[in-house]
Amino acid sequence: MIDLASIGFDEFFQAAFRRFGRPGVPARIAAEHRGAFEVWWTGGSAPARLSGRLRRASEGQPGVGDWVVLQAPPGPGGPAIAEALLPRRSVFTRGAAGRSSRVQVVAANVDVVFTVSGLDADFNPRRIERYVALTWASGAQPVVLLNKADLPGDPTLHVAEIEARCPTVPVHAVSARLGEGLDAPRSHLGDGRTAALVGSSGAGKTTLINALLGEDRLVTRPVRQRDGRGTHTTTTRQLVRLPGEGLLLDTPGMRELLVHENNGVEVVFEDVATLATQCRFRNCQHENEPGCAVQEAIRAGRLTVERLDHFRALEREALAWQRRHDERLHRESERAWGRRIKEAQVRIKVKRGDVDPDRYLK
């Protein structure tokens, strides 16, 4: 038997289930295996599949961590049928690569997201900023765990660097291999709370879960010697219960992490966003415009060019993804591009003397 409160079924989801208003059984998706699901309900664990209506739902398909409504209690005759998705409190997503409009659900209804980065070849401050930006956009609390603190070097220097890049975000150095520093991630857990672990393959996410469990329950492999990268041992998303401490959601390493929402970027780069509001012109591009507060901060040493460049890159990435997948923004972008082409053509004609400049260049 499972106490639903211990796996996160609090008043928020209870109220959503009451509003559902039809017979059914609440259950949480605990794992996904190529379109097949494992759910946890009051009777324990059971296989489940989505109803046709839920597969075609406009809000997208459920992911691990979601709460669904089963048509009936699971029985021995086959998988249970999930017919409805309950509203989410938070959802960590990433934009699908290419032209696809799909947003991939990485973890749903989590209270905290641990961005795990190894203090070896995996350490990449810019990538950590990406993860933190997506976490802020998800509605969960971001926490950065710098794993492999037992390696040579001073981990406090890396902690200070990430704290400077991601203000207000807790940053902890830990060693999953030696079981050191585990009180830090445990301080963000608790009965009924859910934490997702995200990061590159080889960062030590699964090793960290095993360390918190106190046993090697999940399979791990060493990183490759030639480049220090992981071998993608974890291939599915799954929830793991820590008795009395909540749940951990293990995720595979991500080769590509597209930022598709801008609000999380502005939280991570709050210093740049705040400076931008002080510029003389509302549409300031922070380049050579007069009265640019951002460039003034760079000249005064309060902001680095590297930080501004990364802020711009993530903003462009989010806007480009939105333009590809939002029809209105796509049309606006095409109209703006058309206007620029026409303006360039007119300027060429003016330069040649083919048209009256007073008529076209006002």
Image: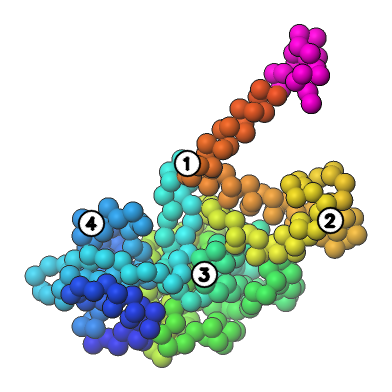
Q: Earlier in the sequence, mark 3 or mark 4?
A: 4
Whole-percent x and y of residue 227?
58, 55
Name the residue located 47 percent from the left edge and 64 percent from the top edge: 92
Q: Residues within 10 Å of mark 4 (few under 14, many from 20)?
A: few
Name the residue located 72 percent from the left edge and 76 percent from the top edge: 156
Give the answer, above or below, for where 110 lies relative to 133: below
Res. 273 visible in picture: yes
Q: Earlier in the sequence, mark 1 or mark 3?
A: 3
Name the residue located 30 percent from the left edge and 88 percent from the top edge: 3
Name the amino acid type tagged 2. Answer: Ala
Q: Which residue is mark 2?
A: 293
Q: Earlier in the sequence, mark 3 or mark 2?
A: 3
Q: Main secondary structure of the magenta part?
A: helix
Callout 2 secondary element: helix
Pointers 3 and 2 in contact (CB under 8 A)? no
Pointers 1 and 3 in contact (CB under 8 A)? no
Callout 3 secondary element: loop
What separation in Å lies between label 3 and label 2 (alpha carbons)? 30 Å
Q: Quadrant of residue 122?
A: bottom right
